[in-house]
């Protein structure tokens, strides 16, 4: 009787038959019967699962102006390819080895410190190219205080120079120009500065406030002047942070080290990081077992603007993710459980969105059918609708897969941080669909490839493209089972190449 009653309700109210929530008239068992009897597909949320979970996330602590003390600047080097970014990073790093006579091999941990004879320091992030854009814009907050824009004096302002300027501006990060390769005979530093004018980069000698330093990264000339320029700008910026209390920071780099296992480099932004601290980042946590600096020495404590490699992560956090210190391991688990709960909520609402879009179309169809059947008796109408509805549901899956018309490529974009996703979306925007394969952007976002992504891709017969993200094993297996292609890249242009390749494969071959 219950089942009949439910069917009556469904027919009369035009409820969305593929999303029914148990309510006073629809309990779980009842809905299951309907599913079995009608052959319809239902998705429903158990009431018990929708209970609000109390917010147990970790939060940044309130600022205490009394404890603010100056901190060193954090610098990123940007500029056109071949203009000398890597060489400049190397020579800045080398200048340290000789200056401190550490003599050891500096390890690549994602950042290093440059010290002036006066004792002032700067922290240089050494993630090159696009990854640098991303880390600048990590999680919307900038982890970089100053951009060193490298422009080769023999080549001048080029495409990526302009792009770098734009990125620095968007992130609200001030610049210093390093006019590089000044040792070359063809070098024309004055031309570089004139060219920069047309991009609103006005150097001091033209009355602006942007410092330009002539350097030769290759010969190590001008490096002290460059560092001094950075320190001077940092003073103007009045960079400050609390040097005590719980640590807050960001992940600059994460990887599995041959000797140390899973390690990530954290940039301390507030507070003091000490051995034994419990940290949460994204969906993982750590009890800090060891900390290392770039020369491989172990540390017991790290202060704001210092970058340290941390051992002790349960799973590796992603670059760009923020880090917060919590009181206990118990608290870390609580925070993670809350964050996973939020993910789940989000996944459900995303699913709901896709379902709703489909439903809207089907409801219109349903109403039209009703109008068609208006002359029938109430019971005849109900039966006809019931039959029709069943057909709709049985054929829906097929419809979706075999949509005729121009070839379509459904894609899902996942990137490590907003910056990279944005870059990819910009490229997609410029894709011209005329006479070609239609591009259907199903979904985009930051973070690792999730089950939702795979499900969505499966539903729309699409592929998942990931930039600098990973795919958890269960998701990999799921994609394999469902035949959903996942393409991962850590170089943006390669990802774009792959995408173009796939688009052209979808085109009908010319006859
Ligand atoms: P990136 O692509 O910006 O990282 O550029 P690289 O650091 O790889 O440098 C590109 C090329 O320029 C290399 O062959 C370097 O040796 C050369 N180069 C870099 N800096 C200088 C410099 O100051 N003077 C000269 N003569 N060559 C340089």
Image (tube, grey):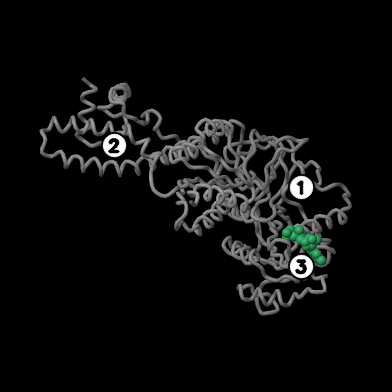
Which residue is located at x 88 percent, y 55 percent? 98
Mark 2 or 3 closer to N-term? 2
Residue that numbered label 1 is attached to? 108
* Residue 488 location (% of width, % of height): 60, 43
Mark 1 or 3 closer to N-term? 1
Q: Is residue 267 above or below residue 328?
A: below
Most distant residue in the front direction:
511
Q: Residues within 10 Å of mark 3 (few under 14, many from 20)?
A: many
SS at badge 2: loop
Residue that numbered label 2 is attached to? 16
* Residue 132 location (% of width, % of height): 65, 55
SS at badge 1: loop
Residue that numbered label 3 is attached to? 180
Which residue is located at x 80 percent, y 55 percent? 93
> Is the distance from the Cβ of mark 3 to the nearest ligand 1 atom less than 8 Å?
yes
Which residue is located at x 21 percent, y 23 percent? 4
- Residue 121 in view of the camera: no
Q: Are marks 1 and 2 in contact (CB under 8 Å)?
A: no
- Residue 343 in view of the camera: yes
> Is label 1 or label 3 in front?
3
Left/right of residue 224 with respect to residue 68 in the rendered view? right
Q: Is residue 182 above or below residue 119?
A: below
**Distance from label 2 to label 3 (Cα)?**
64 Å
144 or 126, which is in the foreground? 126
Q: Quadrant of residue 379?
A: top left
SS at badge 3: strand
10 or 491, which is in the foreground? 491
**Distance from label 1 to label 2 (Cα)?**
56 Å
Which residue is located at x 14 percent, y 31 percent? 380
Most distant residue in the top direction:
1
């Amino acid at each position: 009787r219950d089942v009949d009653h439910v069917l009556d309700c469904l027919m009369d109210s035009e409820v969305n038959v593929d999303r029914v929530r148990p309510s006073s008239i629809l309990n779980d068992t009842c809905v299951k019967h309907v599913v079995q009897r009608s052959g319809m597909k239902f998705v429903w949320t158990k009431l018990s699962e929708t209970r609000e979970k109390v917010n147990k996330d970790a939060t940044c602590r309130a600022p205490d102006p009394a404890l603010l003390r100056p901190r060193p600047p954090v610098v990123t080097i940007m500029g056109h390819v071949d203009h000398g970014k890597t060489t400049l990073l190397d020579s800045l790093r080398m200048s340290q080895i000789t200056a401190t006579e550490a003599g050891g091999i500096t390890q690549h941990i994602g950042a290093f410190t440059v010290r002036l004879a006066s004792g002032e320091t700067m922290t240089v992030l050494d993630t090159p190219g696009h990854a640098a854009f991303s880390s600048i814009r990590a999680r919307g907050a900038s982890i970089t205080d100053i951009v060193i824009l490298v422009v080769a004096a023999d080549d001048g302002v080029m495409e990526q120079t302009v792009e770098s300027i734009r990125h620095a501006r968007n992130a609200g990060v001030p610049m210093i120009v390093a006019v590089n390769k000044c040792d070359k005979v063809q070098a024309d530093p004055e031309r570089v500065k004139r060219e920069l004018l047309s991009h609103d980069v006005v150097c001091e000698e033209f009355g602006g406030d942007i410092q330009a330093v002539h350097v030769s990264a290759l010969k190590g000339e001008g490096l002290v002047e460059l560092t001094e320029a950075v320190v001077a700008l940092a003073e103007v910026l009045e960079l400050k942070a609390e040097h005590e209390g719980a640590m807050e920071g960001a992940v600059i780099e994460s990887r599995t080290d041959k000797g140390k296992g899973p390690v990530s480099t954290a940039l301390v932004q507030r507070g003091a990081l000490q051995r034994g601290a419990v940290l949460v980042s994204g969906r993982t946590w750590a009890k800090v077992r060891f900390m290392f600096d770039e020369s491989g020495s172990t540390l017991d404590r790290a202060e704001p603007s210092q970058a340290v490699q941390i051992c002790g992560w349960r799973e590796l956090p992603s670059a760009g993710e923020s880090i917060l210190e919590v009181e206990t391991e118990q608290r870390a688990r609580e925070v993670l459980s809350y964050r996973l709960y939020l993910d789940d909520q989000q996944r459900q609402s995303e699913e709901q969105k896709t379902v709703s879009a489909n439903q809207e179309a089907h409801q219109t169809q349903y109403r039209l059918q009703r109008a068609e059947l208006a002359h029938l008796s109430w019971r005849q109408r109900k039966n006809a609708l019931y039959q029709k509805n069943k057909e709709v549901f049985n054929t829906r899956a097929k419809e979706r897969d075999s949509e005729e018309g121009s070839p379509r490529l459904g894609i899902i974009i996942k990137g490590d941080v907003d910056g990279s996703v944005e870059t990819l979306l910009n490229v997609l925007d410029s894709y011209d669909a005329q006479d070609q394969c239609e591009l259907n952007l199903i979904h985009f976002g930051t973070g690792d490839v999730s089950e939702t992504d795979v499900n969505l891709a499966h539903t729309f017969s699409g592929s998942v493209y990931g930039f600098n993200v990973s795919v958890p094993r269960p998701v990999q297996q799921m994609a394999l089972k469902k035949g959903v292609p996942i393409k991962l890249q850590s170089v943006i242009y390669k990802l774009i190449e792959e995408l173009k390749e796939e688009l052209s494969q979808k085109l009908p071959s010319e006859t």
